[in-house]
Image: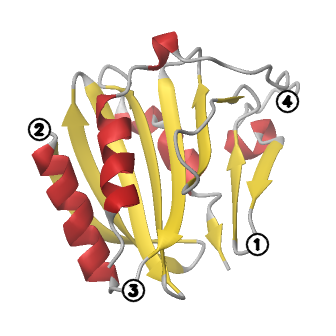
Amino acid sequence: MKIKHLLLFLSIISTLSCSSCVKSDSVPPPTCSDSGCDINAHAVNLVKGDDWELVLPADAQNIDPPFNAIKVFASTHNGDIVLLFMKEEFLGTNDDYVFLALKGMKENGTNIVSVNGVKLNNFPFALIESEKNDMHLLTWTTVKNSNGYALSCAQPLNIPNETHICLDIAETLKIK
């Protein structure tokens, strides 16, 4: 099983503070109606690979990824929220991938809050909720066609869960 990228990925996201990240120019957000705005109204940044796609908020700013398995590395909300999406070769099961993710988080001193089975666009994922360094981290993992996928999103603990932009971003993830 190939896991070095997953463990490095989790190490990056669980220790990252993006206030010093190098950011690229972003697309200005669209004007919203009187009824408000949701992630889809702001979602002008569609990123995709041959078997996945993800929609980012308009203010998402790309950051150069540290290795090729990371397909998306971005920040949003003035750098307060950091997002990473990874795809890597993985020959194990969903349970194996979740176990390795949990192991990597624990080794980095991350406090695991919960692990639950969820569906994103009718595809099964494990959702790992954790905390470290005043950050709330949500990580969705799954395995398909000998590939492991992980979407991690970190935001400050002081942002209430019901306004967790990471949940909205995850809802746009599609694995084909």
Q: How crowded is mark 1: few (under 14 residues within 10 Å), some or many (20 or more)?
A: few
Left or right: where 13 falls relative to 47: left
Q: Which amino acid type is shown beneath numbered disc 3?
A: Leu
Quadrant assignment for the N terminus: bottom left
Foreground residue, 148 or 130?
A: 148
Would you name the residue on which mark 4 appears?
33
- The answer to whether the residues at label 3 and label 4 have Cβ atoms under 8 Å apart is no
Q: Looking at the image, is 16 positioned above or below residue 46?
A: above
Left or right: where 49 falls relative to 74: right
Q: Looking at the image, is 104 positioned above or below residue 135?
A: below
Q: Looking at the image, is 121 positioned above or below residue 19?
A: below
Q: Which of marks 4 and 3 precedes in the sequence? A: 4
Residue at the image point whose x is 59% and y is 14% from the top: 78
Count the marks: how many? Answer: 4
Task: Tell me the SS state at disc 1.
Answer: loop
Foreground residue, 35 or 52?
A: 52
